Amino acid sequence: MTKIDGNTGTAGLLGYPVKHTKSPMIHNTLAEAYGDNLVYLPFEVEPGALGDAIRGAWALGVLGLNVTVPHKQAVMEYLTRIDPLAKALGAVNTLVREEDGFAGYNTDILGLEQALIRADIGVEGEKVLILGAGGAARAAAFLALKMGAREILIANRSLDKAEDLAQSLMQSAKSCDIIPQKVGRMHAQDGQTDIRAITLTELADGCRGGKDAEYLAFQCTSVGLSPHDTDCVLAGETESIFSMIQTGVDLIYKPAETMFMKKLMSDGKRAINGLDMLLYQGVIAYELWRGSYKGEIETDRQVLDRIRELLRGD
Ligand code: ATR
């Protein structure tokens, strides 16, 4: 724990609610590991008070902030600069103090990218299936576009949300506007990514009788989240969709093995959970605050392992 004195800096999380957050544990561990004189605190901010909170944080000299539900979109109007990837995604989860105000980034998407790279799961040229069409699905779908997927198929319970997401992906693919200036690099987009939206039931109908397992699937719904460990978004009439999946990434990290993952693994397929996405989104945010993140994580592997253990044990 940092010894608080006259030079202690402050960072924190803006959300509503924030009581469940793991961010203070991640960031205070990083501050300790780096020997930074910094404390990270949760700030519960009601939606109507967001502007005051950002202006207040700026006036108080706060070095950096994370932003979570329900502020990830609304926060954008209070920023002086937004990273193009976060702008294309339409969501900001990290604010970095700059000379004239806070700049906005989305480290959820960058964290997922790191998790995939480190698990050696390639996306370039792959067929990608996105299950869900909420905020988490948005991050996974934009990452698939950024990493050069050949096809992005968005399957959701309700079609309208899947179509909205497909539409904004197409917009970005056309305008080539998700080339991060500071972090990461965008693959050349030449309109070659095939983007489609479909309902889960329609997709399942097309899978009856089996399919070639050629998709990398991102499970981005809340189904299966602890304590509902035995639930799975692909069940009953939609279970046939499993036949088209080769590798699965569940964005849920608790339980460590979701029912979605278990079913894939019992068929000899590969599946990972969302723990490393959570870990790396926090680490990248911290490194952005230190000015050290340029697309590669520099935090020591032992420190990463320590935080991973703490997240697992929680
Ligand atoms: P998040 O920001 O975590 O992605 P969200 O925006 O509330 O959360 O999105 C939740 C996603 O889970 C949505 O895609 C939702 O489907 P709908 O758009 O049809 O609501 C999906 N979801 C939630 N419960 C589901 C269920 N029982 N079966 C299928 N999909 C479900």
Image (cartoon, rainbow, N blue to C red):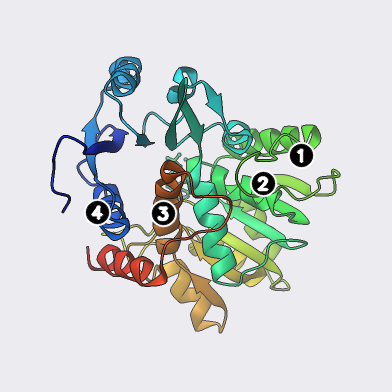
Decide: is 203 above or below 290: below
Mark 4 neighbour density, 10 Å: few (under 14) some (14–19) many (20 or more): some
Q: Which residue appears at 41% of the width and 70% of the height?
A: 301
Q: Which residue is mark 3?
A: 283
Q: Which residue is mark 2?
A: 198
Disc count in the image?
Answer: 4
Q: Could you tell me the amino acid type at mark 3?
A: Val
Tell me if I can see residue 232 in this picture: no
CA–CA distance in space, label 4 to label 2: 39 Å
Q: Which residue appears at 73% of the width and 73% of the height?
A: 212
Q: Which residue is mark 1?
A: 173
Label 1 close to label 2 by CB (< 8 Å): no
Judge from the rendering whether residue 109 lies leftward or rightward of residue 71; answer left or right.
right
Label 4 close to label 2 by CB (< 8 Å): no
Label 3 sits on a secondary structure element that is: helix
Label 3 close to label 2 by CB (< 8 Å): no
Q: Nearer the viewer, mark 3 or mark 2?
A: 3
The image position of residue 109, as x and y in percent, is 54, 48
Q: Could you tell me the amino acid type at mark 1?
A: Ala
Image quadrant containing the N terminus: bottom left
Q: Could you tell me the amino acid type at mark 4?
A: Met
Label 4 sits on a secondary structure element that is: helix
Q: Could you tell which of marks 3 and 4 lies nearer the N-terminus?
A: 4
Q: Nearer the viewer, mark 1 or mark 2?
A: 1
CA–CA distance in space, label 1 to label 4: 37 Å
